[in-house]
Structure formats: structure tokens, C-alpha cells
């Protein structure tokens, strides 16, 4: 897990290495910290822990160049990490893609992302394990989002469409 210093690194794709997050979290953090020109980060299917995601998010706040963040699937992502990622990307106008694993996030955290009203977040999203009250919160957040086209909640066969909600 010894990572070399690399100031010119623009893309870090560690996806599909399920054990790297459990054993190399500190090295991943150090590499991201040393990568001044990082444009793209993909940590999907790495087993990266929520606490590591929080530390990475704190580093990403300082990186003006980041355009793509992919954490899907990221089975260890929880609300704490989700909030940290949200805070890291909130003011990033150059963000082009934010792909998050929504499965373990609460409706409140999901609403924070929807409220970013950013084209970086997929226009078609699926959320599971959301109770009816959470679905209503998500529906309300959708009314302030110009980019979401549809959201599937709880994996059921119904769909909340922003255009329908805006006309209520």
C-alpha cells in the first residue's frame, strides 16, 4: 500500500478492488492529498470506509480541479460520509459527474444532494429503504431541482416526476 508522491496525477481509478479500502485507506488519503491536479476520482467497489470518505471529502474541498467523483457502488458510505461529500462539492461549479451510492443514505442527506440543483448528479436516480415520509421529503426537494428527470423510491413500481410535483 505504499503510494508514491505524484503531483501530476489527474485521474485516480481504484475501482473494483474490494479490499483496498479496508487496508489502504491512509495511503489513498495521502495520495489524494499529494495530487494537486486531480480531475477524476473513482472509488467504487473498493470497500473504502465511511471515515475514510470523510477525510477524502475534506481534501476534495480544497481541490478546485475535481470534475468527477464516483462512489457507486460504495457499500460502506453512510450519512456522515454523504454529508462530507455534499459539503465538499457544494460550491464546485466545474463538477461534471457525481455518482453516489444512495442505498445507505437517509432521505435528509439525499435531499441535500438533490437541492444542489446540479447537472453533475444523474437525472435518473434510484433510492431504496426510504420510508413514505422520506419519499415526501425527496419529492419536495425535487421541486427545486431543474435537472432530475425521475427518481425511483424504494425500488417499487412508482415514480416521482418533478414536473408532476411542480404542478401540485
Image (cartoon, rainbow, N blue to C red):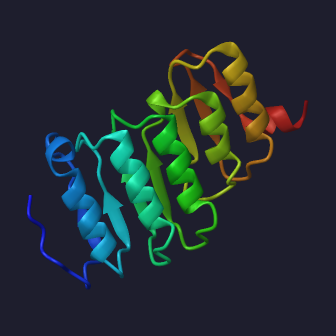
- Establish if 132 lies above or below 14: above
- Establish if 74 lies above or below 52: above
Q: Position of residue 161 (x, y in %)?
A: 71, 33
Q: Position of residue 136 (x, y in %)?
A: 75, 23
Return the residue found at the far left.
2
* Camera-side residue of 142 and 129: 129
At 61% from the left and 33% from the top, the residue drawn is 151
At 63% from the left and 67% from the top, the residue drawn is 91
- Establish if 95 lies above or below 81: below
At 67% from the left and 52% from the top, the residue drawn is 147
Residue 58 in sight in this render: yes
- Establish if 27 lies above or below 126: below
Of the 4 image quadrants, the one containing the N terminus is bottom left
Of the 4 image quadrants, the one containing the C terminus is top right
Residue 148 lies left or right of residue 2; in this view the side is right
Q: Quadrant of residue 154?
A: top right
* Camera-side residue of 109 and 131: 109
At 17% from the left and 40% from the top, the residue drawn is 18
* Camera-side residue of 114 and 35: 35
Q: Position of residue 26 (x, y in %)?
A: 23, 56
* Camera-side residue of 108 and 99: 108
Amino acid at each position: 500500500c505504499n503510494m508514491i508522491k505524484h503531483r501530476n496525477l489527474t485521474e485516480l481509478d481504484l475501482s473494483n478492488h474490494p479490499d483496498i479500502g479496508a487496508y489502504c485507506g491512509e495511503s489513498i488519503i495521502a495520495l489524494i492529498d499529494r495530487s494537486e491536479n486531480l480531475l477524476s476520482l473513482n472509488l467504487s467497489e473498493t470497500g473504502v470506509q465511511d471515515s475514510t470518505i470523510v477525510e477524502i471529502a475534506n481534501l476534495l474541498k480544497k481541490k478546485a480541479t475535481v470534475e468527477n467523483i464516483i462512489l457507486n457502488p460504495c457499500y460502506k458510505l453512510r450519512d456522515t460520509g454523504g454529508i462530507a461529500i455534499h459539503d465538499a462539492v457544494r460550491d464546485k461549479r466545474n463538477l461534471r459527474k457525481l455518482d453516489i451510492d444512495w442505498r445507505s443514505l437517509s432521505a435528509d442527506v439525499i435531499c441535500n444532494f438533490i437541492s444542489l440543483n446540479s447537472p453533475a448528479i444523474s437525472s435518473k436516480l434510484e433510492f431504496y429503504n426510504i420510508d413514505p415520509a422520506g419519499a415526501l421529503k425527496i419529492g419536495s426537494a425535487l421541486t427545486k431541482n431543474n435537472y432530475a428527470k425521475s427518481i425511483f423510491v424504494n425500488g417499487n413500481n412508482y415514480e416521482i416526476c418533478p414536473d408532476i410535483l411542480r404542478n401540485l
